[in-house]
Amino acid sequence: MTLDDIRRIAVIGAGQMGSQIAMQAALHGYPVALQDVSAAQLDKALAGNRTQLDKRVAKGKLAAEDRDAALARLEPTSSLEAAAADADFVIEAVVEKLDEKREVFRRLDACAPPRAVLATNSSYIGNSQLAEVTSRPGKVVNMHFFFPPLVMRLVEVVKGEKTSDETVDLTAALARRMGREPVVLRKELPGFLVNRILRAIQTEAYFLLENGVATFADIDRAAELGLNFPLGPFKLADFSGLDIGYYSRLDRYKQTGNPADLPPQALRVRVERGDLGRKTGRGFYDYSSDPPSPVGES
Ligand SMILES: NC(=O)c1ccc[n+]([C@@H]2O[C@H](COP(=O)([O-])OP(=O)(O)OC[C@H]3O[C@@H](n4cnc5c(N)ncnc54)[C@H](O)[C@@H]3O)[C@@H](O)[C@H]2O)c1
């Protein structure tokens, strides 16, 4: 399959990532089926995308007719089978839980056309763990966008144990056609490039916090003022969603059995409370005020 053979895209999961990945593809001319198990989430995704595009129109960066055309290319559905039935390229963006993703890939393999590439937007999970439940491992790949996908230019494309070179090249070409800049990882490694670097920073930040060296707000300030980071590690964790870091650490722990890989206590208590960061209005910081205020001291 060549880039021009990709005529329809399906995005599975219409959360923070899937909604905007679908929008980015639609802005670049693709009809996109956007599927989620939650009808309320689909409504939220469409409303959020409209707001983003309205802002561009107001700033003169997008013509109103191009906004309307792009929004009209989004086809929301609650049926995974309907979304994938005639897709040439599927991007999975459901919650970061291995079992859930494997189930989605099993179903996609059964209902997507044999020519279709099945890509995952997972932040940490290598595609081989998903490819093995399909009959098309050569067509399974990581296509990892960054939050928020309507803004962030990078896409990591990861070649798994069985991913074909053709699939890697096609995925990178699609990323470019969607206005994004791909980097290719020739080896599969959990967390890929950016999140491995990020994890090293966050691991140190949690170490400092849990050993009582400084408050999370001061650790953030130190990284912002001393390293010129646009966001400190705890603000960034809130921005991405605390559940993402939590589940990825749990999965890693399940693989290694190493207690050092368990989610830090400061992360666990917040996720258990349902404080998942910006998306729930509260995480390390409370987003009901502007600027957001730190919640507690540790
Ligand atoms: N948030 C980030 O910064 C970020 C960045 C890059 C990649 N990712 C990855 O993208 C994926 C999605 O993350 P998110 O932040 O959008 O999460 P999210 O919680 O905002 O969205 C996940 C969506 O998937 C839906 N869903 C769950 N199970 C489903 C199923 N079986 N079929 C269809 N829909 C289902 C949920 O209803 C929800 O709307 C994860 O794998 C995550 O690791 C996240």
Image: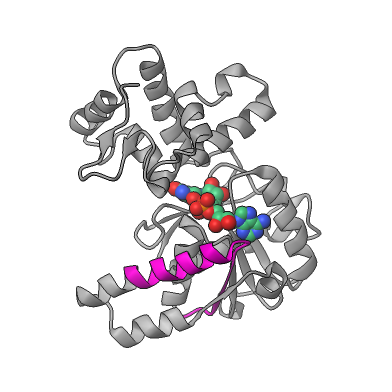
Instruction: State whether residue 184 appears in this view.
Output: no
Q: Is residue 125 visible?
A: yes
Inspect the magenta stretch and tell me whether residue 47 lies in it: yes
Q: Position of residue 150 (x, y in %)?
A: 38, 63
Residue at horizontal 44%, vertical 24%? 266
Q: Residue at x 33, y 68 (%)?
A: 52
60 up-or-down from 154: above or below: below
Q: For the magenta stretch, what is the residue range? A: 29-52
Q: Is residue 266 above or below residue 195?
A: above
**x and y, in percent, of residue 142 in the image:** 59, 53
Q: Position of residue 145 (x, y in %)?
A: 47, 55
Residue depicted at x 53% and y 67%:
42
The scheme the figure's colours follow is: one colour
| Residue 50 in magenta stretch | yes
Looking at the image, residue 90 sits to the left or right of residue 61; the answer is: right
Q: Is residue 226 left or right of residue 145?
A: left
- In percent of width and height, residue 276 lies at 45, 41
Q: Is 231 above or below relative to 114?
A: above
